Amino acid sequence: MKLVIAEKPSVAKSIAKVIGATKMQDGYMEGGGYLVSWCFGHLVGLAEPAAYDEKYSKWRKEDLPIFPDNYIYQVMEDTKDQFETLKSLMERLDVGSLVEATDAGREGELIFRLVYEKCGCKKPFERLWISSMEDQAILDGFNNLKPGTDYDKLYEAALCRERADWLVGINATRLLSTTYGQTLNVGRVMTPTLALVVDREREIANFKPESFYNLKLELPGGMLVSDRFADKNDAESFLQECKDAGEVTITKVEKKDRQEKAPLLFDLTSLQREANKRYGFTAQQTLDYTQSLYEKKLVSYPRTDARFLTDDMENSISGLLGKISQVAGFQTTEDIDIHKVINNKKVSDHHAIIPTMSINKSDIEELPAGEGQIFTLIASRMIEAVSSPVKYEETTVKAEVCGKVFKAKGKHVIDAGWKSVLGINTNVTSDDGDNDSSNLADIEADSVITAVFTKGESLPIRDITCKEGKTKPKAHFTESSLLGSMERAGADETDPDAERKGLGTSATRAGVIEKLVRIGFIKRSGDKKTKYLIPMAKGAELIDVVPESIKSSSMTAEWENKLLQIEKGGFESGEFIAEIMDMITDLCETYVPVDGKENLTNNTSDIIGKCPNCGADVKVGKYGAYCTAKCGMRFGRAFGKELSDEQVERLLMGDKILLKGLKSKAGKDYSAYLTPAGIETFSYEKNGETISGFQYKFEMTFPKKKSKKGGSL
C-alpha cells in the first residue's frame, strides 16, 4: 500500500479519482492500492523563541542575537487533527512507501518534508512532479515517479529560506522594537519591498516640476513640434521669427518598415502584472484565481517563473491552439510560429502558464467572473505568443525654419498581427508607471502626419503656437509596477550573466505585498481599477530606522539568487545561513538609534474606524484589526475566512465586501458579497474553555456570472 500526500484536499480528491482511491474515510481516501490524504498548507512550522528558552518570552535587547543550535518545529494549533491523521497513516503496517504529491516547488517540498520529519517517518518516498492537474498528466506522473532523494537540494533551499526569514524577522524585529518602544515588523524580503515604495513616494514628494516650451507648427499636411525650450522668452522670440519667415522647408522624409514582436507566454509575475493593469486585480487575487483554474484542470501549474515551453510539447501545441480557438473563441493569425514559445534552456521546474487540453470538457462561460477573466488572459496570450508580429510603416518627417528643426512621426499599420487576437489598439503603448522617463511631455505626442511630404519642398505655415509643458515625477507604484521592480531588484549590481530572482520569487511576491498591507505599512489608494500602493507613516518611519543591510534590495536579491544556487547544488546551505548570522550579529552589536527618531509615530495612523459594539477606536495591530477598548468584538474572520485590514475598514464604514473561497455544504467553492447588518453574540468551547464575544451579522448576495466567450477585454 502506498500513502499519497497532497497539499490540499481538492488536489487529493483529483489524484484519488485518477488512481482509483474512491472510498472516502476519515481524513483520507482509499482504493487501488493507495491511501490518499492531504495537508492544509503548512501543518508544521518553526517554534517561537520561547520554545528554546523561557527568557525569550520577553523581548530584551540584551538577549540578542537569537541563534538556535537546533531548530524546533511545532505542529500548527489549528491543524493538529490532520497532522495526527497523517501520522497514523504513515505508521500503518500495510503502508510500505509514500508518494509526495504536494505542489511541485520549493514550498510544496517544505510542507511535505516537515510533516514527514516531524512524524519520524523512515519509509521510502517518491516524488510526483507534474505541471497540470489533468487526468492524463496525473497518470503520466504516477508512471514516472522520481526518487524523493532527487529533491533533497530543493528541500535544503526551502529550509534555508524559512530559517533565514525566521532569523532576520525575529532578531531585527526585536532589536528595533525594543529600541523604539513599539512593534516594528521586519522581514528579509518584506522590508526591502517596503523601502521601494517609501523611496518612490519620497521621490515624488520631493520632485520639483520644471516648465518647458515647445512650438507647434501647423502645415497643410500635419502638425510638427520643435525641440524643447527651457526659457519662455526664447521660445516666443523664435515663434516670431517663424511667423516672419512664413514657410518651412522639408529636410527629411524617411519611411521604415517596423515590427512589434508577439509577447512571451505568461509566468506568474507577468500574469499578475497584466491582470492588475487590465482588471485592477491584486497579485494575490490573480494567484488565487489561477490556482483555482489549475485545480479545475483548466490551466497549467501557476507558480512558475518560466515563459517558454519544452521541446517535448511541440507536437501537442497545434492541437491545443485548436481547442483554445474552439472553446474561447480566439483565432490565430495566418502566419503562426510555435517554435517561438519553445526553449528548453529557459524552463527549469515548470513551463509557462497555458491552458490545458482539458478545456473542452468544461463550460468556460460558467466560471466565476474573476477566474473567467484570468482564463481569458491566459488563453489569448497562448494564441498571441505564436501569432505573427504587428507590421507597420513608420514615417519620420523633419522640417527646418530659421535654423531650427521641427519633427513629426506617423505610423501606418499594415498587419495587426498578434494584436488582432484581442483587437488591441495598435497605436497605444501600455505604460503602467514603470517608465522612469515618465517626465516626458504629453505635448510631444501632438506631432502628427496627415499627408504625404516631399523632401526639399517648401510649405506655408498655417499657424504656430507656443505651448507650455511641465516635467512629471515617476508614477506612484501600482501592484503591477511594484511587482516589476521586485523582479528587477538588484539587477544593476549583479553580473549580467548571473541568474537573478530579484526580491522574492514568483510564488511569494503576492504574499509579501499582502502582508505589508495587512500590518499597516502600506495601503491601497485609488479607484476600483487603478489602485496605487502608498506607504503609511508607520512604514515610512520604519525605513528611516532600518539599517541598509536589511532594506537593501541588492543584498536581498543576492540572497535569493543564492537560494536558487542551493537548489542546483552550486552553493552550500551552511555558508548561506552563516552569512545571514554574520549580518545579524553585526547589526545587533553595532546598531545605533537614529537621531531624531526616538519617539516614532504613536500609530494614530493605524486607526481604521470605530467599533460597532462599543464605539472605541479600531486599530491595526500585529495580529490584525482589534478594538482598543477590548470589548470582545471580533473583526478578523467571517464564515471561517480571514479578512484583510482593508476589508475590515470597509465593513466599519458600512460598505459591502467580496469574500472569495467560501465552501458550500457540498464542498464547492463560491464567492459572496457581505454587507454588515448589525452585530450578534457568539460562543464556543475550546480546550474546555468557553470563548465568547461579538461579531458582525451579514446580508449575503452573490456575484452575477459573466460570459467570457469571445475574450472581450
Image: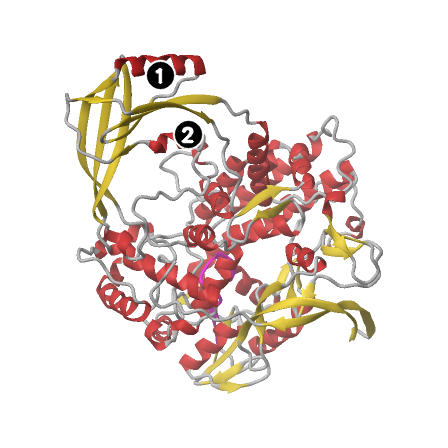
| Mark closer to the observer (2, 1) | 1
Classify 591 as above or below 55: above
Residue 263 place in picture, x, y as percent:
31, 49
Residue at the image position 26 percent from the left and 22 percent from the top: 461
363 and 500: which is toward the camera: 363
- Report, in whole angstroms, how far the alpha carbon at label 2 lies from the one at label 1: 19 Å
How many numbered badges does the structure rendering display?
2
Can residue 593 be seen in this snapshot? yes
Image quarter where the C terminus lies is bottom left
Residue placed under numbered mark 1 in the picture: 239
Residue 458 place in picture, x, y as percent:
18, 20
Q: Is residue 99 magenta?
A: yes
Query: Along the horizontal axis of the image, is 458 left or right of 345?
Result: left
Q: Secondary structure at mark 2?
A: loop
Furthest residue to the bottom?
23
Q: Residues within 10 Å of mark 1 (few under 14, many from 20)?
A: some
Q: Is residue 183 magenta?
A: no
Q: Which mark is residue 385?
A: none
Q: Quadrant of residue 187?
A: top right
275 and 549: which is toward the camera: 275
Can residue 103 be seen in this snapshot? no
For the magenta stretch, what is the residue range?
97-109
Q: Secondary structure at mark 1?
A: helix
Identify which amino acid the numbered label 1 is placed on: Leu
Identify which amino acid the numbered label 2 is placed on: Ala
Q: Which mark is residue 441?
A: 2
Q: Quadrant of residue 88?
A: bottom right
Which of disc 1 and disc 2 is earlier in sequence? 1
506 and 643: which is toward the camera: 643
Q: Residues within 10 Å of mark 2 (few under 14, many from 20)?
A: some
Residue 494 place in picture, x, y as percent:
43, 34
